[in-house]
Image: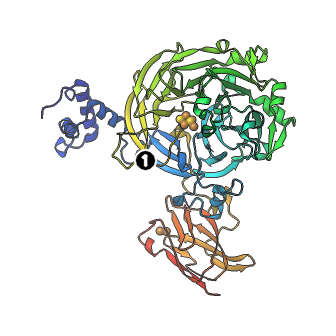
Amino acid sequence: MSISPLVRSPRLVALLSLASLAACGGNQSSAAGGGGGDVMALMQARDLTEQDVTAALKTYTPTGRHDEYYTFASGGHGGNLIVIGVPSMRILKYVGVFTPEPWQGYGYGDQSGDVVGSVTKGGHEITWADMHHPALSETGGDYDGRFIFVNDKCNPRIGVVDLHDFVTKQIVGTELIQSEHGAAFVTPNTDYVVETAQYPAPLGGGYAPIEKYDDEYRGAMVFWRFDNQKGRIVPEQSFAIELPPYMQDLADCGKKGSDGWVFCNSLNVERAYGGILEGKPPLESGASQNDMDYLHCINWRRCEELAKAGRTETIAGMRVIRLETLLQENVIAFVPEPKSPHGVDVTPDGTKVVVGGKLDTHCTVYDLPKIAASIGAKKFVGKDPYGVPILDFQDSIVGQCEIGLGPLHTVFDDKGFAYTSVFIETVVAKWSLKDLKVVDKIDTHYNIGHLVAAEGDTVNPDGRYLIAMNKWALDRFAPVGPLLPQNFQLIDISGEKMSLLYDMPLPLGEPHYAQMIKADKLHPIDVYKPIGFNPAIDQVDPAATVAGKERIERKADGVHVYMTAVRSHFSPDIVRVKQGDTIHLHVTNVEQAKDATHGLAVGGHNVNVSLEPGKHCNVTFQVDRAGVFPFYCTEFCSALHLEMAGYLLVEPQ
Ligand code: CUK
Ligand code: CUA
């Protein structure tokens, strides 16, 4: 085999000699291996091009070295959050949010069990979610690395994950709306987490015939009040606004000069609702009749004042500002947006919002100062059927950028460029915000949905890296049956031309959006301190067990077992109870060594907790049959890990 001309290129030879120099570390002789020649042989053997090797050198992360960025991707149907290192694309963690997660014991003990099941729907426990959009907490429009919020499109809920221990602390939900999509998006100082309805329904639940869609079905936007000090959403201080029954889609909050506004696109202003077997057009065609839908422009700060002034009506426990009030107070207006819009992304400087169009070839760039001024001056050209004033399209835009077929979402870099995912054309288009011209395109494999860039939706994007979050994988990976993974493609956006670095299959659900944050902005803890800490309440648990004070106490409500875990035993290791007892297990890992995690599993009772160093867990369960149930540690914690076990002895009545 002869060396291909590509391999002989001077640039590569320079690269390889650099690489081999680095590999030798200056004190290894080339006889020990490495050396440019060997690398070339390896390239030939593995059929790698110069571009492949460059990509490998840009992503390979040697053992012990940490990544520059964290990416938090939604876990889609998995209802969890996926933490990924960039540029290595190594998965660092799954964080259970809406779905029980056994490794973390999430959903199996009292505390996290309460979080995962804390919102029920009409008495139904919901054990999955359709997670779409994670949003990092912000200060001044920039990621502050403190919290991340996630949404559930199917059963409108918001999860709050604390990044100091990467644990879900709270899930809130509302019966006001029956589905959502424009969530979770935060205001620039994380005062509110925005959640917008998608499929209209009667507000607060309940029935209305679909023929009454126009009159009785409604959209809404919920503003969940976040207490930055406590790190929790405060439902009582939250409020919502009523919207016409369009399908509100994505949302984004204004920043800098446009702070105080929230923008939300919509589809189906036709108010079609399907009825294929009833002689009506399917929803998809009924909803695509008009050339224009409406970009909703809402002054949330004025809405907050209205809520504080009591201009609300309580529906399903949520304070709601009715549309009529919004109109009286001139705090909402629509701007036409081309057909079936998707994506609404405010530029880093806060002066524009970019809207894609699934059935359009343009991104439309709206002029936010102009829109605010027109609303202030009531310069309207019409009203929608619900009385919402409409601004003139041409008068409200900076212009349109001809992107390609099916532009969806847009993120930004630090050099004035926007990057738009183009679904049908299956590319990322890089374009200039200055003259609205495309300057580069790169293929994605295949059919990109969202994309995420390093801090690319903040006031201060980093450039550097972008991930194309592709819907289809087709031929990219070894076949695994009809259900294929999603494909994340890491793209280098530091240069003039974009270049593909890495393909990463994600086989847990369909992540829609993600957030990418500089790693040094996060300061997670190593161990829980002080010992006995309960992460669900962020303090030492009242039932924490102190080493030396282990005991079993029979009380009116059952048997309380105060237990400690330490390498390599549980104390007590024999627990004698009677059939029919309720067991309250209070177990504390009394270790403070990093990574000294134990797990506690009890056979036959679905009991499984994770005990990170210093952590305390409470588990309540019933023993309704007599028997001998071994319990044991589920983390290989020491040489005597297999011996870290005990017996739950349930005597017959
Ligand atoms: S949506 Cu999925 S690709 Cu939920 Cu943000 Cu656009
Ligand atoms: Cu503790 Cu294994």
The picture places residue 402, in percent across and down from the top left corner, at 50, 17
Quadrant (top left/top right/bottom left/bottom right) for the C terminus:
bottom right
**Residue lying at the far front of the rendered structure:** 279
Q: Amino acid at mark 1?
A: Leu
Horizontal side, residue 535 vs residue 612: left or right: right
Note whether residue 459 is visible: no
Note whether residue 431 is visible: yes
Q: Give me the residue at 58% from left, 41% from top.
A: 134
The picture places residue 535, in percent across and down from the top left corner, at 63, 57
**Figure check: 99 above or below 247:** below
Q: Nearer the viewer, residue 132 or 492?
A: 132
| SS label for mark 1 | loop
Q: Give me the residue at 55% from left, 51% from top.
A: 95
* Quadrant of picture, ligand 1: top right
Residue behind mark 1:
483
Image quarter of residue 333: top right
